[in-house]
Amino acid sequence: MHQPHLRGGDLDYCTEALSLIGKLAALYSEKTDDLQTIEAATDVETLTTNLGRKIWQKISLIGVQRAKQKARILLPAHRPRRESGRNAPPSPSIE
């Protein structure tokens, strides 16, 4: 789903939250010898790391899109040059 109101800063906060979740899973798994718990914590860390990467890709795309929008605003639209020579319409004279 496309959400135009979502900004890079919002996505940055999401990556920070994912990082914290992954670290909490690692801390939790250090306190136990249960193999299933350790595997689950490893899965959570892997999942949050991969989601964080995807979000950073989106942040990069937002940056590129914003740069293109700024370029369109700052650079004037391409205008064809006036023809010069015999077939060109007469230029207005200033008297």
Image: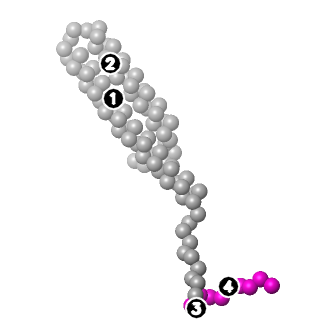
The residue to which callout 4 is attached is 91
Look at the numbered disc 4 and give the secondary structure of its residue.
loop
In three-dimensional space, the C-alpha distance between marks 1 and 4, rounded to whole angstroms, equals 66 Å
Residue 94 percent coordinates (x, y): 77, 83
The residue to which callout 1 is attached is 48
The residue to which callout 2 is attached is 25
Q: Which amino acid does label 3 sit on?
A: Arg
- Tell me the residue at 48%/39% (across/down): 8
Look at the numbered disc 3 and give the secondary structure of its residue.
loop
Which tag is nearer the camera, tag 4 or tag 3? 3
In three-dimensional space, the C-alpha distance between marks 4 and 3, rounded to whole angstroms, equals 12 Å
Residue 3 visible from this viewpoint:
no
Query: Between residues 91 and 58, which one lies in front from this camera angle?
Result: 91
> Residue furthest toward the front?
85
39 w.r.t. 30: above or below: below
- Tell me the residue at 31%/33% (across/down): 50
Instruction: Answer with the quarter of the image where residue 39 lies.
Output: top left
Which tag is nearer the camera, tag 2 or tag 3? 3
Marks 3,1: beta carbons within 8 A: no
The boundaries of the magenta stretch are: 86-95
Q: What residue type is labelled 4?
A: Ser
In the image, 54: left or right of 95? left
- Tell me the residue at 59%/79% (across/down): 82
60 w.r.t. 30: above or below: below
In three-dimensional space, the C-alpha distance between marks 2 and 3, rounded to whole angstroms, equals 79 Å
Q: What residue type is labelled 1?
A: Thr
Q: Residues within 10 Å of mark 3 (few under 14, many from 20)?
A: few
Main secondary structure of the magenta stretch: loop
Q: Which of the image's four quarters has the C terminus? A: bottom right
